[in-house]
Image: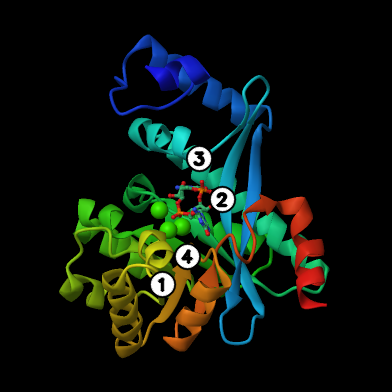
Amino acid sequence: TAKQKQSGTMVYHPGLDAHSQESLSLLSELRRAVEHNELRLYLQPKVDLHTGRILGAESLVRWQHPQRGLVPPMLFIPFAEQTGFIRTLTTWIIEQSARAWREMYAHGLDLRLSINLSTRDLLDQDLPAKLEQLIKTHDMNAQVLCLEITESAIMDDPQRAQQTLERLHELGFKLSIDDFGTGYSSLAYLKRLPVHELKIDKSFVMAMERDLDDAKIVRSTVDLAHNLGLRVVAEGIETAKAWKLLDALHCDEGQGYFIAKPMPEQEFVAWVQAWQA
Ligand code: C2E
Ligand code: CA
Ligand code: CA
Ligand code: CA
């Protein structure tokens, strides 16, 4: 396929057989990536849409491949989920996020970091204990970490997901429903989960300026979140107009290319200082 030609054996594609040669070599490349520090932590700021203040950032992983350059997560995260390697990746990302949080804190920034969890992570019985240990090691408060979970990851095994989420909530972590509106969630079910925030999927946000239906979906999601006592975040803000519209709809927070693209963590502190100056 075109994708294979472009990137050799390394990319995930839907037809990839988990036991094929291609798949085995991708898995060994990923193992090497972790051992040889080829993964990079990128951060994308989240702002208060009313005041413009920076509230935190989302941690997003990239793979700095020695031959292929910067590989986006969609080319290896789905594969990592399929093979179970995602647990290693998630451990890496939470450790790096905690370390980055410490460094930002040392620079006088008290921000919240959001971390993406996958289906497999929600089924991992050890995850709450791992996260608990992590915040002890880095002497941080659990509530500075927000864990983003998609509706479909929850619906894979709702009972087990609920147990994990309850445990994470008891430990003090904030929980967010990511890509809200794209999954097959049951609102009755979501109501019972100890979540703190809904994140409106970028497909609605990016379309709302030209499509009235998308604008209505955004408006009703904001109202739904607020009626349930949740904070609401819009991702995919690409224009000043989108920001204005979302603020007018009382959406609390936003994230998107108009504010900043995800950037290497080393650039983040200077970026925040310049933004706030
Ligand atoms: P996501 O969790 O929905 O993350 C938001 C994605 O939207 C990011 O893509 C971000 O760069 C992109 N985005 C943000 N603002 C805009 C905008 O204004 N316009 C457009 N067009 N895009 C915007 P990215 O970094 O390529 O990540 C893609 C997906 O890969 C993420 O979607 C998430 O599902 C997954 N992912 C990334 N890092 C991790 C990770 O560390 N762990 C896990 N489990 N998944 C991750
Ligand atoms: Ca996310
Ligand atoms: Ca999202
Ligand atoms: Ca998404």
Q: What separation in Å lies between label 1 and label 4 (alpha carbons)?
A: 23 Å
**Mark 4 beta carbon near ligand 3 (under 8 Å):** yes
Whether residue 9 is visible to the viewer of this picture, yes or no, is: no
Secondary structure under tag 1 reads helix
Q: Residue furthest top?
A: 21
Does the beta carbon at disc 3 come under 8 Å from ligand 1? yes
Distance in Å between CA atoms under marks 4 and 2? 14 Å
Nearer the observer: mark 1 or 3; the answer is: 3
Please give left or right for residue 276 compared with residue 67 in the image: right
Q: Which mark is residue 94?
A: none
Which badge, 4 or 2, comes first in the chain's sequence? 2
| Amino acid bearing label 4 | Glu
200 or 23, which lies in front? 200
Whether disc 2's CB lies below 8 Å from ligand 1 is answered yes
Tell me, yes or no, whether the two marked residues, 2 and 3, touch with CB atoms within 8 Å.
yes
Question: Looking at the picture, which amino acid does disc 3 mark?
Answer: Pro
Could you tell me the amino acid type at mark 1? His
- Residue drawn at 28 percent across, 83 percent down: 224
Label whose residue precedes the other's in the sequence (2 or 3) = 2
- Upstream in sequence: badge 2 or badge 1: 2
Label 1: how many residues lie within 10 Å, few (<14), some (14-19) or many (20+)? Answer: many
Question: Which numbered tag is attached to residue 60?
Answer: 2
Query: In x, y percent, where is residue 156?
Result: 22, 51
Lower position in the chain sequence, tag 1 or tag 3? 3
In the image, residue 87 lies at what x, y percent?
A: 45, 41
